[in-house]
Image (spheres, rainbow, N blue to C red):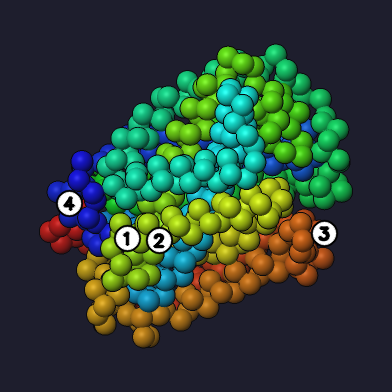
């Protein structure tokens, strides 16, 4: 199969041959991996009971899906990725905000996937064949995983879609075997190693888990969904079908692995660490399936994240090809893996990363959705590509390529979110007004959305009316 040549340019309708089933397959298959499973462990590490952890994960995932899934419709209409599409709201240069947010999100989740996948691989190989658990072993395993991931990401969407279809079936079977393997040791009793509630009382800790473990999953896709739906033609598939497929893919693709993570955390008594106890508690017959899950699942998930990172870097630096940009970000992600393994505490690093990026990314997503409603899903696809073509002008040029109102609205939302966040090493001053409860994603989304909503709509009226679309445009 040839390497995909498309970057963030407009995909012609004849190449948009995917459908809603492909959206489900790619969201399900790519997420059945240890990089997502470990988020089910986070509530347990915060000191929550089993059912408390389950409710936090489920509630957060459903709320996040409701907010995130409609973004899939934007790229269905624009035939390009979401960060480029956001130029309709932020300006053709202002959409770099979305590219940077997407790049950081994908970078963090790629590193996390390779990190946890590599740790489980080393531990499993140690039990199977006595592989030493020193730094050299980890370095080799991380490098091999990263190399395999780069291969799929460089070849592009079609290869990753085929891989996701296989993983959707294979990883589901491996997780079912995992439930059988760990079930004899499962208990819903409190784990003494957790050390009580992370935030001293139930509700603040539960809300922390809702955001860090549940909501963060869908929010990770705020700039990624368009990478898949840009290959779906609105002439052959309705918006409703794509939206339902996205909701199903996100909900199943995130809840299945996360709840598996919560289940195995209690079965393995994994309070302070996940990878080590998971491997130690696995029965001998499950070590080979666990090895396959750690390797194949990690490559599938990290491959999609790297693919999105390559697109975002291609959008930031239009002179770079998508393949070259993918290789560059792969090197950076691999470096983050090494730093994460040798320098960071897993729980603190994960919690800080997801809370900060959620606070910054939520107002961008809200503004993009408000813009979609304002223009009724009608975009000028050619005008969105002005920056990518190193040109000037067009209806989304606004002021020097920036929509000042949207940019200021996002900045206000992001700042409020950062001032209201509660991290292991930092507490924002606005926490005093919320009783110490981290609702940063709510405040950032409300403030950013409200600020943008009161701004006048600078887009030409011809894009904000119901009209028969021109030939080649979405119906």
Return the residue at label 1: 324
Task: Report if the CB atoms under discs 3 and 2 are less than 8 Å apart.
Answer: no
Quadrant in which residue 274 is drawn:
top right
Q: Position of residue 377 (x, y in %)?
A: 32, 59
Instruction: Give whichever of discs 4 and 1 has the lower sequence position.
Output: 4
Mark 1 burial class by Cα count in 10 Å: few <14, some 14-19, many 20+: some
Instruction: Give whichever of discs 4 and 3 has the lower sequence position.
Output: 4
Q: Residue furthest left?
A: 471
- Classify residue 176 as left or right of residue 182: left
Instruction: Give whichever of discs 1 and 3 has the lower sequence position.
Output: 1
Q: Residue furthest bottom?
A: 400
Return the residue at label 4: 13
Q: Position of residue 360 (x, y in %)?
A: 57, 64
Label 4 residue SS: helix
375 or 217: nearer the eye?
Answer: 217
Instruction: Give whichever of discs 2 and 4 has the lower sequence position.
Output: 4
Label 3 residue SS: loop
User: Looking at the image, is 121 positioned above or below residue 111?
Assistant: above
Quadrant in which residue 190 is drawn:
top right
Mark 3 burial class by Cα count in 10 Å: few <14, some 14-19, many 20+: few
Label 1 residue SS: helix
Mark 4 burial class by Cα count in 10 Å: few <14, some 14-19, many 20+: some
Return the residue at label 2: 328
The structure residue drawn at horizontal position 52% and vertical position 27%, both measured from the top left corner, is 291
| Residue at mark 2 to residue at mark 4: CA–CA distance | 30 Å
**Can you tell which mark lies on residue 435?**
3
| Residue at mark 3 to residue at mark 2: CA–CA distance | 43 Å
């Amino acid at each position: 199969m040839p390497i995909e040549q498309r970057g963030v340019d407009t995909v012609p309708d004849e190449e948009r041959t995917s459908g809603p089933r492909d959206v489900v397959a790619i969201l399900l298959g790519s997420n059945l991996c240890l990089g997502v499973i470990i988020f089910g462990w986070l509530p347990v590490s915060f000191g929550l009971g089993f059912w408390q952890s389950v409710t936090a994960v489920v509630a957060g995932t459903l709320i996040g899906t409701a907010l995130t899934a409609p973004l899939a419709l934007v790229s269905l209409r624009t035939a390009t990725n979401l960060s480029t599409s956001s130029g309709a709201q932020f300006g053709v240069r202002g959409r770099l905000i979305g590219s940077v947010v997407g790049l950081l999100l994908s970078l963090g989740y790629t590193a996390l996937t390779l990190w946890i996948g590599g740790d489980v691989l080393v531990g499993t190989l140690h039990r199977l064949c006595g592989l030493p658990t020193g730094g050299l072993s980890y370095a080799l395993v991380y490098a091999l995983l990263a190399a395999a991931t780069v291969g799929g990401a460089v070849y592009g969407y079609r290869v990753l879609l085929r891989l996701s279809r296989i993983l959707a079936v294979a990883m589901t079977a491996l997780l079912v075997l995992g439930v059988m393997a760990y079930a004899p040791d499962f208990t819903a009793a409190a784990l003494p190693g957790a050390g009580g509630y992370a935030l001293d009382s139930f509700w603040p800790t539960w809300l922390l888990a809702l955001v860090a473990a549940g909501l963060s999953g869908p929010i990770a896709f705020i700039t990624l969904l368009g990478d898949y739906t840009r290959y779906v033609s609105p002439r052959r598939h309705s918006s409703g079908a794509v939206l339902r497929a996205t909701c199903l893919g996100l909900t199943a693709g995130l809840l299945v692995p996360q709840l598996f993570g919560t289940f195995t955390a209690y079965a393995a008594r994994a309070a302070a660490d996940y990878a080590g106890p998971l491997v130690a508690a696995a029965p001998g017959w499950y070590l080979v399936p666990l090895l396959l899950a750690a390797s194949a699942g990690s490559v599938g998930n990290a491959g999609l994240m790297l693919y999105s990172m390559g697109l975002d870097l291609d959008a930031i630096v239009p002179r770079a090809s998508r393949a070259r940009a993918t290789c560059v970000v792969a090197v950076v992600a691999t470096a983050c893996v090494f730093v994460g393994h040798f320098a960071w505490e897993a729980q603190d690093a994960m919690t800080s990363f997801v809370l900060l990026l959620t606070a910054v990314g939520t107002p961008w997503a809200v503004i993009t959705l408000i813009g979609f409603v304002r223009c009724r899903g009608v975009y000028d696809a050619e005008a969105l590509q002005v920056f990518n073509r190193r040109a000037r002008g067009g209806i989304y040029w606004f002021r020097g390529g920036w929509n000042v109102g949207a940019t200021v609205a996002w900045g206000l939302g992001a700042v409020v979110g950062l001032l209201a966040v509660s991290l292991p090493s930092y507490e924002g001053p606005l926490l005093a007004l919320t009783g110490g409860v981290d609702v940063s994603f709510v405040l950032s989304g409300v403030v950013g959305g409200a600020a943008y909503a009161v701004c006048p709509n600078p887009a030409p009226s011809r894009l904000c009316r119901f009209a028969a679309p021109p030939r080649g445009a979405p119906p």
